[in-house]
Each structure stands twice: as structure tokens, then as C-alpha cells.
Image (cartoon, helix red, strand yellow):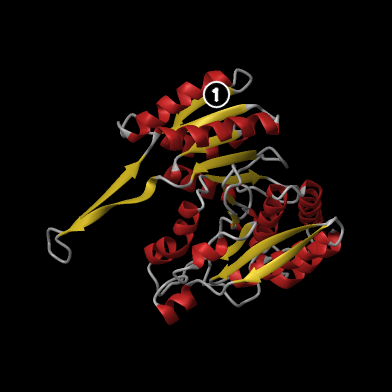
């Protein structure tokens, strides 16, 4: 029997609550299949930062490197600036373990009303692939004249041929595996960003001929944002830079009903290092501790982790359980128009397995 060793970081805010439900579902689904989990929890995040001056200990990455995957809730605290929480935990993990693919599906499930009119279940069914280790979030730059009227901040985007080509190639392969519209859209802004985005466009144009069975197009980020609202059913797989992918996936989450349904995976597709699985939503401190956070994004993120670990049938079982709950529409959290608690939704998913 296979054993999957998982590092668990609940993090901050509602992450603590939704991870509990995600673990509940993972433990239960494993009982129906020939594998088991070993979960080890690490209390890293904003509370750790307040006590120790860092988001995680100096040897944290060495510790995490021994696991098969990382299951994370959310990171962020209203008393700590976002660049501290991001650069202190999430970005070091993504970079150290070369998690160059951020994969985020957006699906309009049965039982969910899109804020866009006239959309039926599965009219919206796309995956956004976000380059995850360089681009606009490469953390290259600096300050001059801090605290003077002439204060300057310089932020540099880094676009390498290798970095662009590998995430674009992964996206072509995904469009082929999905076998739906077999269409890949590249997101660019090379009309205004005439260096890094040119490297991106050239990489896309080089790789596209290798996949003659995949239709392609290229959209400027502003046009893509409009089309995500105007005609989201036109998209299949979308690939964009770190910043552009970040923006579009938030749009994708909202047009499919709720951030509480938006799953996400930070992947090393080559399986050299552990991949990290965290939902799109943040720590939501305004509802922390109220028991109303939707755990479905965390649960669906767990299904993505199962699939990454090779447990496809278990992943499908979890996804079907969530879909059944959404279709019935009786046990839902307030973000989906219900009155149920975080815990009761997690228990209902377990009962639907």
C-alpha cells in the first residue's frame, strides 16, 4: 500500500478552519482506496512571525523537501504587510521547489448561479496556467532615497526563454490531455512591454508548431479580462505570466460563483521536488473564527493533490462528492447563499463520498 507523506501548513485566518475540513475529506477518501496518508503539521505563518520574526524557521525548506506534497490553507494577516507574508513563506517555497506551474481551474458547477447572465452548468470550464517562479513577481529591484520626497522603487520583471518555454509547453500538453476545445490562449502585453513580453511571445510562437492539433490565439491582458466577462465559454486553457495569471484567475473564480470554490496547485511537473496545494482565496480575516468559511476550495485543492500523487479515482470521488452537494443545494455556506457552517459542509462532503 502506497503511503503519501504530506506537510500541512494551515497558515492564517480561515486557512486554519478550511484545512481541517480538507484533511477530514482526505482521511476518509483514503479509506476507500489502497493508499494512506501521513500528515505532519507545521505551525508556520503570521502567528509564527509575531513570535519569531520570520514566517517560518531557517531550515523550513530543508524540512519540506522530504515530503511528497505540501497542503496549505492561506497566508495573510491585517497587522502584517502582504509583502512580508508573501516573501516570507509562499514565494520561497515556490522558488526553492521550482513550482513553475500554477494551475487554477474555473468551472461553473451545477447548482451555482454565475453573476453573468445566461450561463448554464459547465458553460465555463477552463484552466488558467500561471507562470509561477519569475516574471513580474521575481523580486528583483530596489529602493533609493527611502523616506525622502524623492523616494524611488524599481520593480523588474524577469522573463527567461527557459521559464517561458516550459510553462507554455506544459499548457499545450494540458490542452491536449483535457481533450475538450483543444485550444490554448496566450496572454501578453507586448504592445506596451517591449522586452519581457517579447520573449514570452517568441517562446509561444516557437512552441506552437509542435502542437498542430491545438488551436491557438494570443490576447492582450486587457482584452482577455474583458472576454473573461463577455464570453468566458470561449476559453479552454489559458497561459499567462505571474501577474496576468494572478489577475485572471480571480476573475475566473468570481464568474463561477465564489472564491470559495477556486482550487489551485503550485506544481513541479517534473516531480523533482514537492508540489504545494493551496486554494485561490486568502485568509479572509473578516470571517475568521465565525465558522462560515467555505471549505470546498480547500477540498477541491485536495483533489488536485490526489491527482498529482497518482490517485485519480480518489480525486474523482472527492470532486463528485462536492458536485453532488452543490447540485442538491441544501448544505452550503453563506457565500453560496446557504446558512451552513464550515464544519457541516465538510462533514456533508465526507458523507457523500
Q: Look at the numbered disc 1 and give the secondary structure of its residue.
A: strand
The quarter of the picture where residue 174 lies is top right
Query: Camera-side residue: 36 or 232?
Result: 36
State the residue at coordinates (72%, 52%): 306
Query: Camera-side residue: 339 or 67?
Result: 67
Furthest toward the bottom, the residue is: 51
Furthest toward the right, the residue is: 32
Query: At which x and y percent is residue 286?
Result: 52, 72
Query: At which x and y percent is residue 160?
Result: 38, 36
State the residue at coordinates (39%, 76%): 53
| Vertical relation: 343 (above or below) 274 | below
Packing grade of label 1 (10 A; few <14, some 14-19, many >=20) is: some
Q: Which residue is mark 1?
A: 216
State the residue at coordinates (29%, 46%): 156
Indicate the quadrant containing the C terminus: top left, top right, bottom left or bottom right.
Answer: bottom right
Query: Camera-side residue: 208 or 7?
Result: 7
Q: Is residue 15 visible?
A: yes
| Vertical relation: 77 (above or below) 68 | below
Q: Going by the image, does 200 lie left or right of 27?
A: left
Q: Count of labels shown?
A: 1
Query: Camera-side residue: 117 or 301?
Result: 301
Indicate the quadrant containing the N terminus: top left, top right, bottom left or bottom right.
Answer: bottom right
Amino acid at each position: 500500500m502506497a503511503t503519501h507523506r504530506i506537510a500541512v501548513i494551515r497558515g492564517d485566518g480561515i486557512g486554519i478552519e478550511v484545512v481541517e475540513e480538507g484533511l477530514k475529506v482526505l482521511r476518509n477518501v483514503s479509506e476507500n482506496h489502497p493508499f494512506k496518508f501521513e500528515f505532519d503539521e507545521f505551525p508556520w505563518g503570521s502567528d509564527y512571525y509575531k513570535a519569531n520574526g520570520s514566517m517560518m524557521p531557517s531550515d523550513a525548506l530543508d524540512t519540506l523537501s522530504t515530503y511528497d506534497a505540501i497542503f496549505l490553507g492561506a497566508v495573510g494577516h491585517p497587522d502584517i504587510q502582504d509583502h512580508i507574508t508573501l516573501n516570507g513563506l509562499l514565494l520561497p517555497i515556490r522558488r526553492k521547489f521550482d513550482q513553475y506551474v500554477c494551475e487554477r481551474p474555473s468551472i461553473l458547477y451545477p447548482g451555482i448561479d454565475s453573476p453573468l447572465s445566461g450561463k448554464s452548468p459547465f458553460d465555463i470550464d477552463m484552466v488558467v496556467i500561471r507562470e509561477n517562479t519569475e516574471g513580474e513577481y521575481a523580486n528583483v529591484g530596489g529602493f533609493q532615497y527611502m523616506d525622502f520626497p524623492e523616494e524611488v522603487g524599481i520593480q523588474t520583471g524577469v522573463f527567461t526563454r527557459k521559464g517561458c518555454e516550459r510553462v507554455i509547453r506544459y499548457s499545450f500538453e494540458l490542452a491536449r490531455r483535457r481533450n475538450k476545445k483543444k485550444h490554448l490562449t496566450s496572454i501578453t502585453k507586448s504592445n506596451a512591454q517591449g522586452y519581457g513580453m517579447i520573449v514570452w511571445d517568441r517562446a509561444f510562437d516557437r512552441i506552437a508548431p509542435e502542437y498542430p492539433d491545438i488551436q491557438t490565439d494570443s490576447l492582450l491582458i486587457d482584452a482577455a479580462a474583458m472576454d473573461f466577462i463577455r464570453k468566458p465559454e470561449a476559453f479552454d486553457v489559458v497561459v499567462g505570466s505571474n501577474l496576468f495569471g494572478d489577475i485572471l484567475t480571480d476573475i475566473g473564480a468570481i464568474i463561477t460563483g465564489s472564491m470559495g470554490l477556486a482550487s489551485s496547485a503550485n506544481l513541479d511537473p517534473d516531480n523533482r521536488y514537492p508540489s504545494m496545494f493551496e486554494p485561490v482565496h486568502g485568509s479572509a480575516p473578516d470571517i475568521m473564527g465565525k465558522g462560515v468559511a467555505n471549505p470546498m476550495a480547500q477540498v477541491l485543492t485536495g483533489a488536485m493533490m490526489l491527482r498529482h500523487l497518482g490517485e485519480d479515482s480518489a480525486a474523482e470521488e472527492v470532486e463528485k462528492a462536492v458536485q453532488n452537494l452543490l447540485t442538491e443545494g441544501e448544505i452550503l455556506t453563506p457565500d453560496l447563499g446557504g446558512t451552513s457552517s464550515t464544519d457541516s459542509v465538510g462533514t456533508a462532503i465526507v458523507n457523500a463520498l
